[in-house]
Image (cartoon, helix red, strand yellow):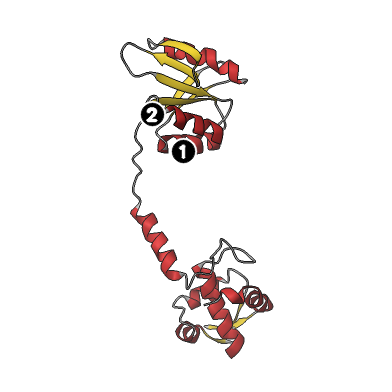
Amino acid sequence: MREAELYPPIKAFLERQGYEVKGEVGAADVVARRGQEPPVVVELKTGFSLALFHQGVARQAATETVYLGVARPGKVALERNVGLARKLGLGVLTVRPRDGLVEVLCDPGPFRPRKAPKAAERLLRAFDRLRGDPNAGGATRHGLVTGYRQDALACARFLAVHGPSRAAKVAEWAEVPAARQIMADNHYGWFARVERGVYGLTEAGRTGLADWGDSAP
């Protein structure tokens, strides 16, 4: 749809609710009035964009009732952008291209984020597990360093020095309580099970130490 094709169905939609509607009023794409109520502003674009959100936020200086009007996009883009609009206090109207059906996906209003205690706990666990600040500046040569990778590097470094060792010994001496699970899972291909409870370092593990050694605790 072209941007101009969004206006007629949105105008008709608002008029059915008793609004008087005019296009291109001042800086606003659409302005609707109903009695003494605050005006409704709709900013139109064929799709979501940063510019559209900027325009919507700018119109909030004139009225709290601001909608973004777009041609209905795919499901993923719709969910993400409607979520962002809610956070900014903006409403969203979509127009279905094949028949001009207008749908209200959300109304303007204050955003009240839902608290997620488990998410906060996971964040703090990841913070505590990460030793030092290996990701200062955004990324290392090979990517972001996680606490899990640091633990795997500590196990690999121990095995490189001491040779194949029992998991319990690696856990104690390398100070990695989850050493047995890390070496058994072998997520990076660095470890080989020599015998029950005993693990050694693979060539991939030696390469990993060479590549990531500056990130090891």
Numbered mark located on residue 108 in the image: 2
For disc 2, the neighbor class at 10 Å (few under 14, some 14 to 19, many from 20) is: some
Measured from the top left, where is residue 149 in percent x and y? 54, 70
Give the residue drawn at x 53%, y 30%. 52
Give the residue drawn at x 53%, y 12%. 8
- Identity of the residue furthest to the front in this view: 26
- Amino acid type of the residue that numbered disc 1 sits on in the rendered structure: Leu
**Residue 17 to residue 135: above or below:** above
Q: Secondary structure at mark 1?
A: helix
Question: Left of 108 or right of it: where is 187?
Answer: right
Q: Are marks 2 and 1 in contact (CB under 8 Å)?
A: no
Q: CA distance from mark 2 to mark 1?
A: 12 Å
Give the residue drawn at x 33%, y 40%. 112
* Earlier sequence position, callout 2 versus callout 1: 1
- Amino acid type of the residue that numbered disc 2 sits on in the rendered structure: Pro
Task: Answer with the quarter of the image where residue 183 lies.
Answer: bottom right
Question: Left of 86 or right of it: where is 166?
Answer: right
**Residue 168 to residue 90: above or below:** below
Residue behind mark 1: 84
Q: Nearer the viewer, residue 28 or 195?
A: 28
Measured from the top left, where is residue 85 in percent x and y? 45, 34
